[in-house]
Image (cartoon, rainbow, N blue to C red):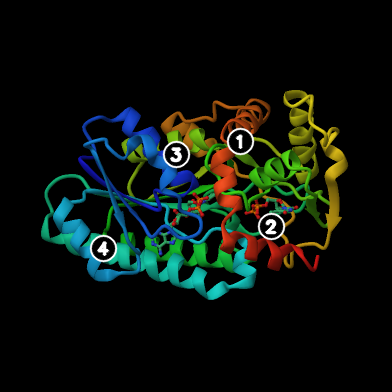
Amino acid sequence: MKSILITGGCGFIGSNFIHYIIDHNQDLRVTNLDAVTYAGNEANLENIKTNPNYHFIKGDICDQELVRKIFVENDIDTVVHFAAETHVDRSILNPLEFLHTNVYGTGVLLEAAREHWQKNPTGEHRFHHISTDEVFGSLMPNDSAFNESTPYSPNSPYSASKAASDHLVRSYFHTYQLPITISNCTNNYGPYQFPEKLIPLFISNAIHGLPLPVYGDGKQIRDWVYVEDHCEGIYQILSKGKVGETYGIGGNNQPTNLEIILEITSLLDEILPQSPHKPHAQLIQYVKDRPGHDRRYAMNISKINRELGWTPKESLNSGLRKTVEWYIHNANWVENINKNKEFNHFLQTNYSNR
Ligand code: NAD
Ligand code: TYD
């Protein structure tokens, strides 16, 4: 790894990964390609922007000419592909944007990698595709967790578009021997997550005394991984993972949404004892369920543990405490997003008729 292209590096996981990789590998040249959509935020990388090993290009992964040029000019040998439309609720409102970025955009990157690496066959190359456990569909309460051989069964336009992109990446290995790896990770949480997702939305709303809108009965189950653990897992796959393989990544926990929400509200009661909104759990409101809402996700992480020695370091308890504290200490970061017109329009559209 000498010259790495990170797509979507201004988003939640991508920016955490750039922080991680710049700390862990000082010899690497990092190029970040990000269109800075509503979810992208250059402020996430404020303290890195003057690092001589870091280079930011504002642009779209669907722009074939630009992507080709980036490969040639930077002699890219490694890709970590995060860029995507990622919010399930938005995919229900506007599915075509998900198809375009997540499927076509991945195709453009694969083609550019294939072309550049075919012309420059010497040295090691890797295309790592970041995906989600949501491609496997929904589990019943007593079903075993997903693993790397679970058949795909996506239920939302988001997960269907991610599933399609996974298939495309896989096909480039089988057809062109492009050296790919894929990781399917569970729900992430931690610093820099856009406050449309459950954990940051509920922290921000609770701090401001706004309602906490629980979809349906709140008994849906997710497996939550702290974002830095996910970044470490990706780094292990880049360093030691086997080409052509898929790795599941997760946090080894199974809370219901309501359990997570009550943990957040009690952390806020403890950390903000003077808050006028205490007890914060009084802000919980049950609202109309998400259409097609997946009931349960869980990921078996024994393959990455056994083959690469990776295991999550953070427990849900310690990770949630760090996350709540981060959002309290970075109130300006959240306020700047909360002022955004597009975000307010989305909140209005998604929540007003629930
Ligand atoms: P995010 O929504 O926070 O960020 C996405 C980033 O991609 C933004 O910076 C955005 O500007 C950029 N982007 C979007 N469209 C683009 C385009 N056409 N060209 C260039 N850049 C574009 O997403 P995230 O939560 O950081 O997720 C990153 C990846 O991880 C995604 O592929 C997602 O499917 C996957 N993933 C996320 C989670 C999770 O819990 N957040 C879990 C598993 C997998
Ligand atoms: P989310 O963070 O959107 O991630 P995903 O849908 O990809 O798992 O949602 C996590 C869970 O929280 C999911 O079961 C939906 C639920 N949820 C709510 O109950 N209310 C909300 O306002 C949001 C955003 C999510």
Q: Could you tell me how far apart the alpha carbons at marks 2 and 1 are, in whole angstroms?
A: 30 Å
Residue beneath disc 1: 327
- Disc number placed over residue 67 in the picture, else none: 4
Kind of residue sitting beneath label 3: Asn
The mark tally for this picture is 4
- Disc number placed over residue 16 in the picture, else none: 3
Of the two numbered discs 2 and 1 on the same chain, state the one appearing first in sequence.
2
Residue beneath disc 2: 138
Of the two numbered discs 4 and 3 on the same chain, state the one appearing first in sequence.
3
Kind of residue sitting beneath label 1: Tyr
Q: Residue at x 20, y 45 (%)?
A: 124
Residue 166 at x, y percent in the picture: 45, 60
Q: Is mark 3 within 8 Å of ligand 1?
A: yes
Q: Residue at x 39, y 71 (%)?
A: 104
Q: Residue at x 79, y 26 (%)?
A: 274
Q: Is residue 5 above or below residue 326?
A: below
Kind of residue sitting beneath label 2: Ser
Q: Could you tell me how far apart the alpha carbons at marks 2 and 4 are, in whole angstroms?
A: 35 Å
